[in-house]
Image: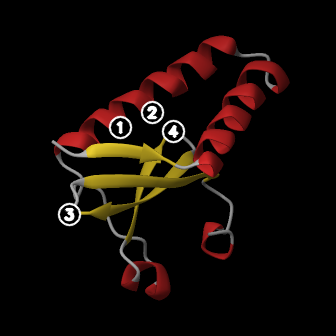
Amino acid sequence: MYRLVVSELAHSDLDNIVSYIAIQLANPIAAANFLDEVEKCYSYLKSNPLMYERCHDAFLEKEGYRKATIKNYVLVYKVDQAASVIIIHRFFYGAQDYVKLI
C-alpha cells in the first residue's frame, strides 16, 4: 500500500474547484460528488499507483508525471516506488494547458 502526499498547491486547487462548483455554479451536490470521485481516485492510487496514464508531454513523461481524469479535471501526480509514496502535485481544469503550469 502506498502513502499519499498531497501538496499545498493541490490542496488549494481542490479547495478552489469545490468552491467554484458549490458557490459560483450554485451546485453543492455536484461539488460533493466531485469530492467523492477524488476520494475514490486517491483510494485507487494507494493500491495501484501506476493505473493511470503518463502525461503525454515529453518533458512531463520523462520526469515521471502521471495524470488521472476526474470529471472535467486532471489530477497530476508522481510515484516514488522506492519510498512507496504518491505525490499529488496539482489539479487542473481539463481545458487548461497544465503542462505550462507545473
Element on which disc 4 rests? loop
Label ID, residue 71:
4
Number of numbered tags placed on the structure image: 4
Density class for disc 2 (Cα within 10 Å; few <14, some 14-19, many ≥20) is: some
Of residues 52 and 13, the one drawn nearer to the viewer in this rendering: 13
Of residues 84 and 51, the one drawn nearer to the viewer in this rendering: 84
- The residue pinned by badge 2 equals 38
Q: How far is disc 2 from disc 1 in space, using C-alphas? A: 6 Å
Left or right of residue 83: residue 87: right
- The residue pinned by badge 1 equals 42
Density class for disc 3 (Cα within 10 Å; few <14, some 14-19, many ≥20) is: few
- For the point 43% across and 77% down, the residue is 56
Left or right of residue 52: residue 62: right
- The residue pinned by badge 3 equals 81
Q: Nearer the viewer, mark 4 or mark 1?
A: 1
Extreme residue toward the front, this view: 83
Q: Nearer the viewer, mark 1 or mark 3?
A: 3
Q: Are marks 3 and 2 in contact (CB under 8 Å)?
A: no
Residue 4 in which image quadrant: top left
| Mark before the other along the chain sequence, 4 or 1 | 1
Element on which disc 2 rests? helix
- For the point 62% across and 21% down, the residue is 31
| Mark before the other along the chain sequence, 3 or 2 | 2
Q: Amino acid at mark 2?
A: Val
